[in-house]
Image (cartoon, helix red, strand yellow):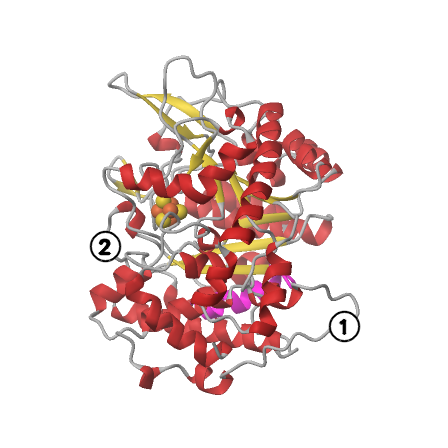
């Protein structure tokens, strides 16, 4: 499948990286592998949709959806909105929903504290029962194993609050305070709208702010547009925002991303992280876009990834030219990891995910036709969160099925993107720590085996988390290709 002769320029220049951890001031065991993304900064991260609500459909059927104040669709009543994708949380798809059955802050925090206990129980089981086999199967060099183990023993827990617009939750600030009081790293994935437009909310938020604010940057029309918007003052940006029709949610989000960056120049906002979906309409200028965001917001973490399609049962969205452009981005991303590893300053300040980029390179270099490569890049038959113990260490919590007697919507361990494969029938605040641990390591696989149409896979960087979970969840058809590329970079 993989043609070794067309390994990238960066592979040739980088192989293999010196993987020798050096002790140094302030360096802890495990830092070395964390900086490359071989192991994540926490054994598990939690992504929780705190805004799940019930929507009554025209046919009287209830469904759980997410409360959002944006409309990110490609069209509304047949009229194009300029959007590049359709988000199920969009306003126009969920008329009339409100926050009446959203789970209260105390219940969510209580559930998250128990989830943290469940993660630690799963961690102990994984370290004892699964890590030795992982080391053997992946031929991890002996001198690196203590580093992997130290990083995987981390007690750190990271929670990402997301779902529609999480700041619409009436207890958003209290949830952040509860998690930070418990010592959990807390990220808020936001459009930025309420933070920009509601000074009272912003003041409350900044009393105990989230550790990271994550915003989207995948809907800019061009790098020049980005520069033009960054040159505007706050009043001009507000006028620009008002000129965008409400139905054009992706465009509004793009303006809001700039507004929040400009606000961060004047007020002490948390560090910013940019999620950037790479799609056919921005791949032509993706590298310049990343350059310009890095220049306008020094220090911001950049998290680009190709648009995903397999989890929806759809074909890959990228054509031949898109894939060639994506390959250019992948090469720079790999060079960035190499540069940072060797002590230099990388062109882009990327989230550390070397194995993720190695996998993308191996998929793009497949000896296969364009459609197959596009499907793979869109996640088909590459990685799943449910194939083996330890592949799905990212805990997602969100919507499930409405049921009689359910007081609050949401709260189901599962998957925000594919609700029909690994979704737990019960809500997480009713689960004990050992039940959560069981779901993390074994329950997903059990549910997937019973699923009518199990998810075809995905390559969301947050879901695949780090090198260990990525490698454990890889489909056998791509393992050899991935290992070939990894050997060139990492020597094993
Ligand atoms: S996390 Fe699991 S269920 Fe969700 S899209 Fe990925 S593979 Fe599918």
Q: Residue at the location (51% across, 83% down)?
A: 14
Which residue is nearer to you in this view: 209 or 290?
209
- Residue 273: give x, y in percent of width and height: 58, 54
Which residue is nearer to you in this view: 218 or 135?
135
- Residue 8: give x, y in percent of width and height: 40, 81
Secondary structure type for disc 1: loop
Q: What stretch is highlighted in magenta?
A: 286-300
- Residue 108: give x, y in percent of width and height: 57, 28
Q: Residue at the location (53% across, 26% down)?
A: 429
In the shown orientation, is residue 117 left or right of residue 265?
left
Q: Is residue 234 magenta?
A: no
Hey, which residue is sitting farthest top in the picture? 405
Residue receiving disc 1:
24
Secondary structure type for disc 2: loop
Number of labelled discs?
2
Viewer-nearest of discs 1 and 2? 1
Q: Residue at the location (33% across, 43% down)?
A: 86
Which residue is nearer to you in this view: 121 or 100?
121
In the shown orientation, is residue 11 left or right of residue 291?
left
Q: 8 above or below 461?
A: below
Residue receiving disc 2:
315
Q: Is residue 299 magenta?
A: yes
Predominant secondary structure, magenta span: helix
Circle nearer the N terminus (1, 2) = 1
For residue 424, which quarter of the picture?
A: top left
Label number found at residue 396: none
Is ligand 1 within 8 Å of the beta carbon of the residue shown at mark 2? no
Say if residue 72 shows up in the picture: no
Q: 100 above or below 226?
A: above
């Amino acid at each position: 499948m993989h043609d070794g002769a067309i390994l990238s320029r960066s592979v040739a220049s980088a192989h293999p990286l010196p993987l020798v951890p050096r002790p140094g001031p302030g360096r802890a065991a495990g830092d070395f592998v964390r900086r490359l993304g071989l192991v994540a900064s926490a054994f598990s991260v939690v992504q929780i949709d705190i805004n799940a609500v019930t929507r009554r459909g025209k046919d009287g059927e209830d469904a759980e959806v997410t409360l959002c104040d944006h409309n990110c669709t490609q069209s509304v009543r047949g009229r194009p909105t300029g959007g590049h994708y359709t988000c199920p949380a969009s306003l126009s798809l969920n008329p009339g929903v409100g926050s009446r059955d959203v789970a209260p802050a105390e219940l969510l925090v209580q559930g998250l504290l128990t989830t943290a206990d469940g993660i630690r129980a799963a961690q102990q089981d994984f370290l004892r029962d699964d890590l030795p086999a992982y080391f053997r199967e992946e031929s991890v060099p002996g001198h690196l194993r203590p580093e992997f183990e130290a990083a995987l023993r981390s007690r750190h827990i990271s929670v990402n609050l997301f779902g529609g617009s999480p700041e619409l939750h009436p207890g958003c600030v209290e949830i952040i305070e509860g998690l930070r009081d418990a010592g959990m790293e807390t990220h808020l994935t936001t459009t930025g709208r309420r933070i920009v437009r509601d000074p009272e909310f912003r003041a409350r938020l900044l009393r105990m702010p989230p550790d990271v604010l994550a915003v989207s940057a995948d809907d800019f029309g061009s790098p020049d547009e980005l520069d033009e918007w960054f040159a505007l003052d706050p009043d001009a940006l507000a006028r620009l925002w008002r000129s965008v029709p409400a139905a054009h949610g992706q465009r509004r989000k793009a303006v809001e991303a700039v507004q929040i960056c400009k606000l961060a120049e004047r007020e002490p906002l948390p560090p910013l992280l940019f999620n950037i979906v790479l799609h056919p309409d921005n791949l032509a200028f993706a590298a310049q876009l990343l350059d310009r965001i890095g220049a306008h917001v020094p220090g911001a973490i950049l998290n680009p990834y190709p648009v995903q399609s397999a989890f929806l049962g759809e074909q890959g969205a990228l054509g031949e030219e898109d894939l060639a452009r994506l390959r250019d981005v992948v090469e720079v991303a790999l060079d960035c990891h190499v540069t940072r590893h060797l002590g230099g300053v990388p062109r882009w300040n990327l989230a550390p995910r070397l194995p993720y980029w190695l996998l993308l390179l191996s998929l793009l270099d497949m000896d296969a036709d364009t459609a197959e490569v596009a499907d793979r890049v869109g996640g088909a038959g590459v990685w799943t969160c449910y194939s083996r113990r330890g592949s799905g260490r990212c805990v997602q919590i969100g919507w499930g099925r409405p049921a009689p007697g359910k007081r609050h919507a949401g709260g189901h361990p599962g998957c925000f993107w594919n609700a029909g494969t690994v979704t737990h029938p019960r809500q997480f605040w009713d689960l004990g720590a050992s039940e959560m641990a069981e779901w993390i390591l074994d329950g997903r696989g059990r549910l997937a085996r019973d699923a009518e149409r199990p998810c075809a896979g995905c390559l969301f960087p947050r879901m695949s988390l780090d090198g260990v979970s990525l490698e454990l969840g890889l489909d056998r058809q791509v393992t050899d290709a991935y290992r070939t590329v990894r050997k060139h970079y990492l020597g094993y």
